[in-house]
Image (cartoon, helix red, strand yellow):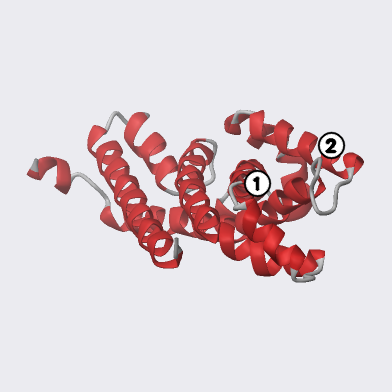
Amino acid sequence: MNALILNIDWSAMLVSTGETLYMTLVSAVFTFLFGLLLGFVLFLTAKNGLYENRLIYRLTASFVNVFRSIPFIILIILLIPLTVLILRTMIGSTAALPAIIIGSAPFYARLVEIGLREVDKGVIEAAQSMGASRWQIVYKVFFPEALPAIVSGMTVTLIALISNTAMAGVIGAGGLGTIAYNEGFEANNNGITVIATLIILLIVFIIQIIGDQITRWIDKR
């Protein structure tokens, strides 16, 4: 056990952990924003929605379904031209962000849509009977009532984001995925792979605990 620990470059492991956290946190912000927007568009423009619009719903649903269905490792490859166009590079932690965001936002959008559909229709009818406008119903009824589900969905999405950063690391994005593959698997150093895996698990557990606590705190039901 001591030999395993001594055989690890802890400074490199620390840098890789920082890169993983960087990719996770930055992509989480944009995934939350885009996913929330897509989820509300899906819900509001669906049949019997407050802003029912068949064309917008079908276009949004098609985008969400397509990018939610593509395996992430393939999506990274497909988006290389876009990544190079935007960032002038296809290597590094920042270069992985477009693929991580585009791959995760549609997933989160569906979770947001599901959370909105679970809002009690009686609360909506009560707001309508009091003369609330459609926009008031959106931000004073739907959003507050669905907030626990929205936060819980973001917790699930964050954990998926970490998995995506690890896969992106295999093709040069940096982070714990890269060090586990290059320095662990290819160099036949199982200790590095084990430590990288344990750090990822620790990050996942921390995110899950924080997400659960926030969900319980805001859930007034």
Q: Residue at x 26, y 55 (%)?
A: 10
Which picture quadrant has residue 142? bottom right
**Residue identifier under label 2:** 58
Q: Is residue 126 above or below residue 86?
A: below
Asked if residue 33 shows in the view, the reply is no
**SS at mark 1?**
helix
Residue 101 position within the rendered picture, expressed as x and y whole percent measured from the top left: 63, 49
The residue singled out by tag 1 in the image is 113
The answer to whether mark 2 and mark 1 are in CB contact below 8 A is no
When the figure is inspected, residue 71 is found, relative to residue 42, above or below; the finding is: above
- Please state which of residues 30 and 131 is positioned toward the viewer in this rendering: 131
Q: Picture quarter containing residue 207?
A: bottom left
On the rendered image, what quadrant is the N terminus found in? top left
79 displayed left or right of 210: right
User: From the viewer's perspective, is residue 132 above or below residue 151?
Assistant: below
Q: Amino acid at mark 2?
A: Arg
Cα distance, mark 2 to mark 1?
14 Å
- Tag count in the figure? 2
Question: Residue at (81%, 54%) from the top-left corner?
Answer: 50
Residue type at tag 1: Glu
Residue in the image at 35% along x and 30% along y: 185
Using a 10 Å C-alpha cutoff, classify the residue at mark 1 as few (fewer than 14 neighbours), some (14 to 19) or many (20 or more). many
Q: Quadrant of residue 138?
A: bottom right
Q: Secondary structure at mark 2?
A: helix
Q: Nearer the viewer, residue 14 or 108?
A: 108
Residue 82: % across, % down: 77, 44
Q: Earlier in the sequence, mark 2 or mark 1?
A: 2
- Within 10 Å of the Cα at label 2, are there few (<14), some (14-19), or many (20+) other Cα atoms? some
Q: Position of residue 59 (x, y in %)?
A: 85, 39
